[in-house]
Image (cartoon, helix red, strand yellow):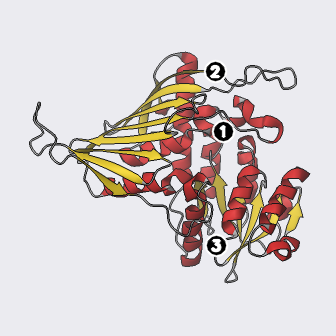
Amino acid sequence: MSETIRYGIIGSGMMGGEHILDLNHIDGAEVVALADPVAKSIDWGLGCVEAGPGGAEAKARVATYSDHADLLADPSVDAVVITTPNFTHAAVLADALASDKHVLIEKPLCTTVDDCRRVVEAAEGRDAITWMGLQYRFMPTPAAMLQQLSTGVCGTTHMVSIREHRFPFLEKVGNWNRFTRNTGGTLVEKCCHFFDLMHLVAGAHPVRVMASGGQDVNHLDELYDGEVPDILDNALVIVEFANGVRGALDLCMFAEGGRFEQEITITGDLAKMEATVPGDVVWLGERSAAGKPGSHPGGGVREIPAPMDPRVPYPDFHQGASYMEHLHLAEAIRAGRPASVTLTEGMWAVATGAAAHRSIDERRPVELSEFGLS
C-alpha cells in the first residue's frame, strides 16, 4: 500500500457523502472511487469530493462504478467504506470480505442475526482490517463517559439509561427506510448504537430483552406502491445483562421539540454520570462516603469537560464521530493493528434490537439464546 490510503465508497448517498467530506480533511487519505447504482447518488458523492481541498482536480481523478464488484476489483483502492441501504449489507459484505481491501461497514451490520453471523464468519482470518461502524463510541460525551467509567469512579455499574427524543426518519433514496423488512426495524436501524453503548458500559453480553413499542404518529399518511410504512416510531426497551446490569432505552421519534435530543445516565454504587448528545460536558455526582440511607450526597455534582476534538471539520456530522472514527481506522491500517470495533460487537447490537422487536411482536421477554447467542 502506498503512503496515502486510497478509499472507495460503496454507496455514495447521504451517509456516504458524510464519510467523503470527512476523508477530504484527513492527511494521507484520498477518495479514489465511488460505486452506486443510482446516478444521483454518484453525482452527490462527486460533489462531496469536489468540496474538499482538492476541488475539481480531485473529483476528476475519481473512478465511478454502478456495481460495487467493479470497485472491489479496482487495484487502486486500499480500503472501502460501505454505506449502502441496510438490506444490501449482507450481499455487499460477502463480496468485500472476499477481497483484500480494508473494510468499514456502517451500522447496522446486517438486518438479521443470521446474516450477521455469516459475515462474522466470513471476516475470520482476513489479513485486512474489518471495522464495524458504531460511531457513538467516538462522540465527545459518550467517549468521555466511557473513559471515566474505566477509572472506577462509579464503582460497580448497575444501570445505564439512554433516552432519544428526536425527529422522524429522514428521506432516503426510494424511501427504503420506511419498511422494517429493509431496515431490520427501528430498534436495529436506529438503536444498535445505543445497545452497543449499553454493552460497553455493562461489560457483559445481554441475555434478556423486554420491550413495548409501536407506530403511532409518523409516516401513517404515506403510501409506497400501495403500501403504508410499518416502521416503529416509539419504544421502551429494558435489557438485562449477564452480570446483572440493567439497561433502559426510551425512544420517541416525534419529539423534536425537547431541550435535548439524547440523554445518557450511568449509575453505579459510588456515583452517577449524566450527559447529553450533543453536549460538551459530563456531570458526575458522587454518593456520600458512607452510602447510608438518608445521608446527604458526599461530593455534590461536578462537571467533567468533554470537548470536541479541534480537528473535527464538520461538528454537525454526528458530533465529529465519523471523522474521529476514520482517524482511528487510518491509524490501525498504518500500524497493522486489528480493528478496535469488531463485527462481533456489531452482531450483538443487532441481536439486541432484533430481540426487542420480537418482544414487542410477541408481547413477552425474549432471551438472546433464542438467536443462538450466549
Which mark is first along the chain, 2 or 3? 3
Residue under numbered circle 2:
215
Between disc 1 and disc 2, whose residue precedes? 1
Q: Is residue 172 visible?
A: yes
The structure residue drawn at horizontal position 21% and vertical position 41%, both measured from the top left corner, is: 269
Residue 225 figure quarter:
top right
Closest to the observer, 119 or 43: 43
Residue 11 appears at what percent x and percent y?
78, 53
**Can you tell which mark lies on residue 111?**
1
Mark 2 crowdedness (10 Å alpha carbons): few <14, some 14-19, many ≥20:
some
Q: What residue is pinned by disc 3?
A: 26
Q: What residue is drawn where x is 49% and y is 24%?
A: 211
Instruction: State the residue at coordinates (73%, 29%).
Output: 179
* Label 3 packing within 10 angstroms: few (<14), some (14-19), many (20+): some
Task: Quote the CA–CA distance across marks 1 and 2.
Answer: 19 Å
| Above or below: residue 367 compared with residue 4 | above
The local secondary structure at tag 1 comes to: loop
Q: CA distance from mark 3 to mark 1?
A: 31 Å
Residue 232 disc label: none
Q: Is residue 150 above or below residue 178?
A: below
225 with respect to 93 (left or right): right
Type of amino acid under label 3? Ile
In terms of secondary structure, where does tag 3 sit? loop
Q: Is residue 156 above or below residue 360?
A: below
Name the secondary structure under disc 2: loop
